[in-house]
Image: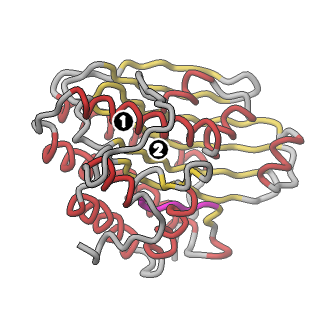
Amino acid sequence: MYSVPDRFEIEKSYREIQSLICEKMESCDGRGTFIKDEWSRRGGGGGLTRVMSEGNVLEKAGVNFSAVEGEVTPMMAKSLKVDAAWFFATGVSIVMHPKNPNVPIIHMNVRYFETDDGTYWFGGGIDLTPHYIVNDQASYFHKKLKQVCDKYEPSWYDKFKKEADDYFFIPHRNETRGVGGIFYDHLAEHNSLPKQQIFDFSCDLGRAFPEIYTHLIALNRDEPFNEHQKEWQKLRRGRYVEFNLVYDRGTRFGLMSNGRTESILMSLPKEANWFYDFNPKEGSPEELTLRNLKKGVDWINAF
């Protein structure tokens, strides 16, 4: 018999995941520290934004915790397809932008949502955005995610990978944001496992984050780079910004629910560039990376 976690237990665990990730990433970076910025939301709840700037490895990194509640506005009801008067939402969201273009950008979030009519769901995911795709590193990343999924439901990795390919896609560029990962939403007991197990899955995903990313940092942090590669990094960051401002559901929900703008937009890099009609040299590392920014790549078995 599984217990049924309530909103207070979920909120407490997500706070602990935020602390764990900040501690591990500070240790990995070696210089940068996460400043703390507590905030409250007009209407109910608040959060703790933690941001690192100008570390040894990380140029800008954000680990945001929030727990907000309040009235379901007509805009929220239409967007989320709920018929309720009150909502509660809590979660942790992470984006890390490294200095070295050989180190990938990474994003993760885990979240929980409930309303006063008994509706609830979990959502979240993790995806990797290399400036330069390294096949065996992309394979490592996907294998680790599959291990987390397989612990709970063998079908989840394939299902959630496809959802990530579809979600982390920039239609106006016809390219994926990176090498994908996993993405899930509206995961609830009525169409999946008991609530406790879904909650455990979300926590395991959060706890896996520092192991996965510190490994990728260790592989790449000392790789040399030049100004051309830095310019390419800024261009790829520009594509990241386009996705987050135009398509990201978390950004839209935060703005719709009157969240704190600085915390909502913490995912944006310190610097990003846009070049008119940029076309990389044929056969270059940049061109090979663009060639692999597509849906449906079997990163585990193809390399």
Q: Is mark 2 on a helix, strand or loop?
A: helix
Q: Which residue is drawn at 47% across and 81% down?
A: 155
Marked residue nearer the N-terminal end (1 or 2): 2
Q: Which of 67 and 213 is in front in this view?
A: 213
Report crowding for label 2: few under 14, some 14 to 19, many 20 or more residues within 10 A (C-alpha): many
Q: Is residue 61 left or right of residue 140?
A: right
Query: Residue at point 59% right, 75% down?
Result: 192
Residue stretch in magenta: 179-185
Percent position of residue 137, x then y: 22, 58
| Number of other residues with Cα within 10 Å of mark 1, as a class: few under 14, some 14 to 19, many 20 or more | many
- Residue 44 in the figure: left or right of residue 242: right
Query: How far from the left and from the top, in percent, is residue 44?
Result: 72, 29
What residue appears at the point 47 percent right and 34 percent down from the top-left corner? 238
Note whether 75 is above or below 290 in the view shown.
above
Nearer mark to the viewer, of 1 and 2: 1
Q: Is residue 188 magenta?
A: no
The residues tagged by marks 1 and 2 sit, at their Cα atoms, a distance apart of 18 Å
- Of the numbered discs in the image, which one, if any, rests on residue 245? none
Residue under numbered circle 2: 14
- Reading the image, the residue beneath label 1 is 96
